[in-house]
Image (tube, grey):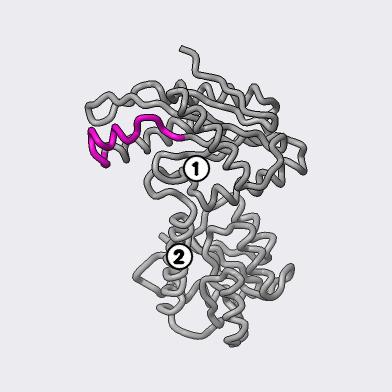
């Protein structure tokens, strides 16, 4: 069953579209009709649809901005434009605005309309998959380096605007190489996935946990009220990672070294912030790991994990 939202104010055109889809025997379509864009938004807000068939001439919306509005309302739902105008330039612009296809009303057979909807759904899935691959780490499912930088830049802008602090952490696993050398890279991958889950459990949903590559991770803590709160999170993480992992019948013990800097107290561009966190992380490494260090403008002070 494919659920389709038909946004069409013309009764004749709506009936024609529904008749065409009802004649298609390969798949069954469940059609919900909205006569205005506002009514369509109401349906999209409380129900899930596989696709939207969108007229560009509605009582409360007209032209290509209609496509942009639907995309802004629900960027995950594929849109097929139904237009009374056979205009190749308009069709191309509609696709550029976010539509998956452009069809002229009353033209073609049931197969054309049904196939267009099915292809639109598959194209949207492929698009979302490519976006995911470009922004998330394939092994752990965490944010990757590229998306992390974007989120940090946005968080820094919010920090200045809302006068709130950001805790930036750079984390590196202790003794990870020994795990790979002893148990193999497959076990190392399993360990990285387990570490990612523990890191996420140590922070809030609004915070960002990212994998930068190898056994290096980063965390953005937004809207923190004090330096002490950031250190509490760091202590929670070191204790969590120090707890042995049970993987494939083996008990594996590692640690984690954390470098921390706080923005806008440390008021520098992204690369400088990461450099400061990196320097603090290596100070933690020098003490044997399972520790965290806080970078400050006047120097770096540290807090070791208490037994």
Q: Which mark is residue 165?
A: none
Instruction: Judge by depth and name the residue closer to the eye, 250 or 129.
Output: 250
Mark 1 Cα within 10 Å, few/some/many (few <14, many 20+)? many
Q: Which mark is residue 121?
A: 2
Q: Residue furthest top?
A: 307
Q: Nearer the viewer, mark 1 or mark 2?
A: 1
- Residue sitting at x 67%, y 69%: 66
Bounds of the magenta segment:
172-186
Q: Is residue 87 above or below residue 6?
A: below
Which quadrant of the figure has residue 87? bottom right
In the drawing, does residue 111 fall left or right of residue 10? left
Residue at the spot 45% in from the left edge and 72% down from the top edge = 21
Q: Secondary structure at mark 1?
A: strand
Residue on which the image places disc 1: 210
Q: Main secondary structure of the magenta part?
A: helix
Horizontal and vertical percent position of residue 168: 60, 36
| Foreground of the two, 74 or 133 | 133
Q: Is residue 269 shown left or right of residue 23?
A: right
Is residue 34 rendered to the left or right of residue 139?
right
Where residue 156 appears, x then y in whole percent?
68, 44
Label 1 close to label 2 by CB (< 8 Å): no
Q: Quadrant of residue 33?
A: bottom right
Q: Judge whether residue 205 can be spotted in this image.
A: no
Compute the Cα span from label 1 to label 2: 30 Å
> With 181 as the anchor, is 42 left or right in this view?
right
In magenta stretch: residue 184: yes
Residue 128 appears anywhere in the view? yes
Image x and y of residue 139, in percent: 37, 46
């Amino acid at each position: 069953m494919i659920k389709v939202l038909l946004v069409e104010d013309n009764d004749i055109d709506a009936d024609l579209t529904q008749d065409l889809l009802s004649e298609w025997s390969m798949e069954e379509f469940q059609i919900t009709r909205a006569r205005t864009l506002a009514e369509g938004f109401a349906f999209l807000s409380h129900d899930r649809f596989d696709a939207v068939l969108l007229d560009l001439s509605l009582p409360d919306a007209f032209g290509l901005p209609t496509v942009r509005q639907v995309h802004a309302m629900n960027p995950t739902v594929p849109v097929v434009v139904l237009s009374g105008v056979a205009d190749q330039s308009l069709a191309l612009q509609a696709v550029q605005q976010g539509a998956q296809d452009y069809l002229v009303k009353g033209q073609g057979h049931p197969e054309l309309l049904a196939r267009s909807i099915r292809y639109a759904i598959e194209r949207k899935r492929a698009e979302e998959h490519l976006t995911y691959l470009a922004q998330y780490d394939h092994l752990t499912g965490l944010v990757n380096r590229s998306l992390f930088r974007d989120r940090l830049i946005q968080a820094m802008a919010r920090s200045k605007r809302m006068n709130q602090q950001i805790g930036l952490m750079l984390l590196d696993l202790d003794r990870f190489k020994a795990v790979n050398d002893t148990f193999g890279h497959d076990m190392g991958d399993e360990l990285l996935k387990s570490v990612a889950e523990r890191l996420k459990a140590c922070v809030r949903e609004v915070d960002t946990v990212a994998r930068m590559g190898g056994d290096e991770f980063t965390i953005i803590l937004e809207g923190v009220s004090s330096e002490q709160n950031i250190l509490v999170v760091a202590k929670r993480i070191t204790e969590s990672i120090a707890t042995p992992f049970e993987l494939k019948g083996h008990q594996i013990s590692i640690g984690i070294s954390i470098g921390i800097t706080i923005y806008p107290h440390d008021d520098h561009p992204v690369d400088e912030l990461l450099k400061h966190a990196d320097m603090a992380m290596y100070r933690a490494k020098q003490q044997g790991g399972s520790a965290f260090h806080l970078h400050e403008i006047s120097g770096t002070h540290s807090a070791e994990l208490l037994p």
